């Protein structure tokens, strides 16, 4: 059976202690032969709503912690970059560079990431037509000297894209399941289940969210057919310093992943 890509971890590095606790709990996914697992956490959340919001430990300290996680738990690591100069530095530690949704068309950032040996996960912006993600993918591939396009080319060259819904009025996102099919023409697709239920800016300078919809949407995406899933998770989401309202706790995450694997297995049998 084709492996399911799973990206999971706390939104931001709150402390080395928390990150290590999360890595220890999530290690079971890396041991599962059905899963291609990446531990995710951000060294800096540069796009927070308020200047007073917690951003993380920063590039140097954050990468030091992620490198410790990589060595201690033998995990593949994914983290965000926000500025071009961060790409080369981060790629010396992490396996996947993630391009934030708001920056998915930022040419210099995409080119800088493409010049590294890391895989790249491009998060489709909430404002972007699903079919237009092909141009962001093309920037990466052409920088790497590849003129061909399409799902298999992107897959072979370590490029995938993530869907997190589209802006619907103010403070809400809606997932159009058609976008998963459209985007999958150009690259492997990751369904960003936790950010899809985010409600940007509705909590007085912070984003809110409806975590009760995470699992239904993830199951729907699995039924449509995607390559993987992105979940932000925390020991106690209510105490998380970033994105708590749209996170899953660890136990709910484990149950959700188990169900997604069942659905994926059914979909594979139908092919």
Image (cartoon, rainbow, N blue to C red):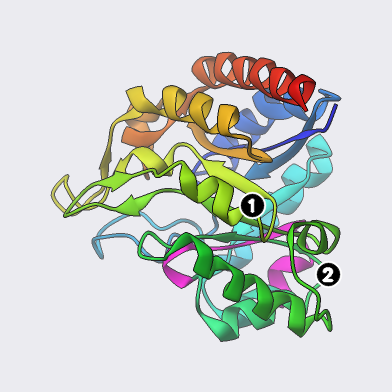
Residue at point 66%, 39% (across, down): 228
Q: Position of residue 231 (x, y in %)?
A: 53, 36
Is 99 colored magenta in this rendering? Answer: yes
Q: Quadrant of the N terminus?
A: top right
Q: Nearer the viewer, residue 49 or 193?
A: 193
Q: Circle 2 sits on which residue?
A: 117
Q: Circle 1 sits on which residue?
A: 184
Q: Earlier in the sequence, mark 2 or mark 1?
A: 2
Q: Is residue 189 visible?
A: yes
Q: Nearer the viewer, residue 52 or 230?
A: 230
Residue at point 43%, 23% (across, down): 216
Alpha-carbon span between mark 2 and mark 1: 23 Å
Tally of numbered tags: 2
Mark 2: few/some/many CA within 10 Å (<14, 14-19, 20+): some
Range of magenta residues? 88-103
Mark 1: few/some/many CA within 10 Å (<14, 14-19, 20+): many
């Amino acid at each position: 059976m084709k492996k399911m890509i799973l990206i999971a971890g706390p939104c931001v590095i709150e402390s080395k202690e928390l990150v290590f606790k999360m890595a220890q709990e999530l290690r079971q996914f890396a041991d599962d032969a059905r899963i291609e697992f990446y531990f995710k956490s951000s060294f800096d959340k540069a796009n927070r709503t308020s200047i007073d919001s917690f951003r993380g430990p920063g590039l140097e300290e954050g990468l030091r912690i992620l490198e410790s996680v990589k060595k201690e738990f033998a995990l593949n690591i994914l983290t965000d970059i926000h500025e071009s100069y961060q790409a080369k530095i981060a790629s010396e530690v992490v396996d996947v560079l993630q391009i934030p949704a708001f920056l998915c068309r930022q040419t210099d950032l995409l080119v800088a990431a493409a010049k590294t040996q890391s895989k790249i996960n491009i998060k489709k912006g909430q404002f972007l037509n699903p079919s237009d993600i092909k141009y962001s993918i093309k920037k990466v591939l052409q920088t790497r000297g590849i003129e061909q396009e399409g799902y298999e080319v992107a897959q072979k060259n370590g490029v995938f894209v993530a869907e997190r819904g589209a802006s619907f009025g103010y403070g809400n996102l809606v997932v159009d399941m058609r976008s998963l099919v459209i985007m999958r023409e150009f690259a492997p697709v990751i369904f960003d289940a936790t950010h899809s239920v985010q409600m940007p800016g509705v909590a007085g300078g912070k984003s809110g969210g409806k975590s009760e919809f995470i699992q239904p949407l993830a199951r729907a995406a699995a039924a449509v057919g995607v390559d993987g899933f992105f979940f932000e998770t925390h020991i106690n989401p209510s105490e998380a310093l970033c994105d708590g309202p749209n996170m899953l706790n660890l136990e709910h995450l484990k149950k959700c992943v188990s169900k997604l694997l069942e659905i994926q297995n059914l979909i594979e049998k139908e092919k």
